[in-house]
Image (cartoon, coloured by chain):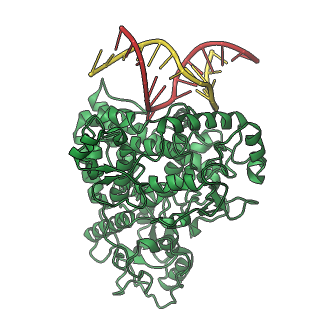
Chain colours: A green, B red, C yellow
Amino acid sequence: MAKPRVIYWFRTDLRLHDSPALKAALDLEPEALWPIFTWDPHYVYHVKASPNRWQYILDCQQDLSDSIRKLNPNSKLFVLREAPQTLLPKLFVAWKATHLVTLWDSDEVVAKNGGKPTMSITQLQTAGYKIGEVPKPISAPDSLPDPGEMPIDFEQAQAPKTADLNAPYRNKADKTYNSLAGPNGDFAIETLEELGLPAATTPHRGGETIALKQLNKIMADEKYAATFRKPETSPAAFEPQSTTLLSPHMHFGALSPRLFYWRAREVVEKYGKGASTPPESLTGQLLFRDMYFAAQAAIGSPYTQTLNNPYVRFIPWHLPSKHADTETGMSAISGEYHVDSPQADKWFRRWKAGTTGFPFVDALMRQLRIEGWIHHLGRHMVACFLTRGGCYVHWERGADVFEELLIDHEPASNAGNWQWLSCTAFFSQYFRCYSPVAFGQKWDKNGDFIRKWVPELRHLDAKYIYEPWKATQAALDKAGVRVEGDGLSNSHKEGVYPEAMFDFNERRSVCISAMKRAFKIGLHGNDEAVKNGTWKVLFEEAGETEMEGIGGAGDTDEGDYADDADHESHKISRSRDGGKHGRGKGNAIKQGPMDRHVKRLKN
DNA sequence: TGAATGGTTGGTCGC
DNA sequence: AGCGACCAACCATTC
């Protein structure tokens, strides 16, 4: 019998160690093994992502390729520029491949939770206890067989030319798909240049080498690692930040969560008394990740949206998503939204631009844009502010922005955390509201974090730095800053910081009252009244005025975008169902290459 | 069954 | 400075 010829298809799991599928492939003692990555046009054009995020995945690919080369100089990561569903069948014939392996599938948590989504950390922990110990990571292989002949004498499927959602970022045309094996025919990893994108601005870089180095550094500080308590880490810390920054590595698969988990466990056991425990500890953070994954696995595609999601509370937020098909509602979010309130839209655009006039919020949003990363509690602050604690804008708008800008964007965690913060699922104490003034001051009295990210305020007295609208003229003159404008038309003027876009305490009480009424009405995303629009009657009867369709200059879809530098935000992509993981209609192969937990396929 | 309890990460005031 | 009571009062789980 002929020896197997294996295609090892990397999707997001861009690491060599801790891959049961790769181990299984090597156990077959293949004659040839091709480590391939499919660069999918669907992903490149239809998932909106900043250059920071593109850079990260290119880093991960390069690092993986280098690691493969070290094991076998004849091999590397072979990148093919075509969608997997059209490419793989052709590759099987052309390369005479006999096996395709990808990653593993895990729905055990859901099964142990009675088939229901894990909606709290205790549920996750109970389910995890029933399953047993987290498996130890598998070490990287110490050798890899040669790849076989790699003919590509077949047609490359045409890349779709419509709706390039990343067009606003590109300063040149995208050339990624000009040829299947890249410009030199050597299956090279893409470059930002080829993608037509400008350079990344983030200092955070990807790849397993960096990830492992960072992991070692964290675990070497035994006290830090063993006593880590997430709620006590500062969102205002920078250089260095207060948390591990390992999330983007895990997102792209450059770091194994199991390796992270077991390294943390070892440090905790060695440390003994005084070590922190889940959910606040380092391992606890990984449990939250699994909680969101399992919730998504159980709920399916409505998980990342409100419509049709029985676990998400319906709140008539401003700027609701447009749904392509409200009848079926499945994967229906088009990425566009209704501008029911021009005022709320302006608040949203100022939030996204980091020009709300609330310095702590603006500092965080600017860090997000430049670095692609902000501290978890900083995310809480800006998320609460956009939704239930300020703007009363739909959490799906915020989730869209995070998806675009975060280098560690993970669909399940992103949607879950937005639901948490907006009190629509996982968490419900809406009267606990973050203050853009007090919350930052709790961590950073002097406002050093603001001084870094909002340089126009860097000389302002600490007394006023969180609320410059209260500063005396003398204090402003001394700091060389003027507080004026709406944050959109003059956002880049030297020495000018915008006026606060509303009275926070006023908005806070309006929002809390509105949340109270919405909770009393008690609709969820799958209720008929939500699908057919009759929810509105219920809210009107309750005397609600802070809701979709009411507020600002009136009930209209035609906002005023005359000074809108960012109106492409109306067409943000969503790839929200990235977590179906091959469940349901056998659709694993249709998903973008950045998805996690791909089902293992047998040929 | 109704009350008690727990829920990773709020703000403010007063001592 | 750090702690506890209070604010107005959520949900799901447990006993």
Residue A103 spot, x, y in % from top left: 48, 60
User: What's the residue at 69%, 39% (across, down)?
Assistant: A544
User: What's the residue at 21%, 44% (across, down)?
Assistant: A478
Q: Is residue A31 visible?
A: no
Residue A116 spot, x, y in % from top left: 65, 42
* A437 is higher (above) or lower (below) than A59: above
Q: Is residue B15 left or right of residue C11?
A: left
Which quadrant of the view contains residue A516? top right
- Residues A570 and A294: in front is A570
* A464 is higher (above) or lower (below) than A69: above
Residue A280 spot, x, y in % from top left: 40, 33
Which quadrant of the view contains residue A203? bottom left
User: What's the residue at 55%, 62% (across, down)?
Assistant: A574
- Residues A221 and A27: in front is A221
- Residues A386 and A574: in front is A386
Which quadrant of the view contains residue A422? top right
Q: Is residue A551 left or right of residue A411?
A: right
- Residues A478 and A547: in front is A478
Residue A2 spot, x, y in % from top left: 48, 78
User: What's the residue at 33%, 78% (across, down)?
Assistant: A193
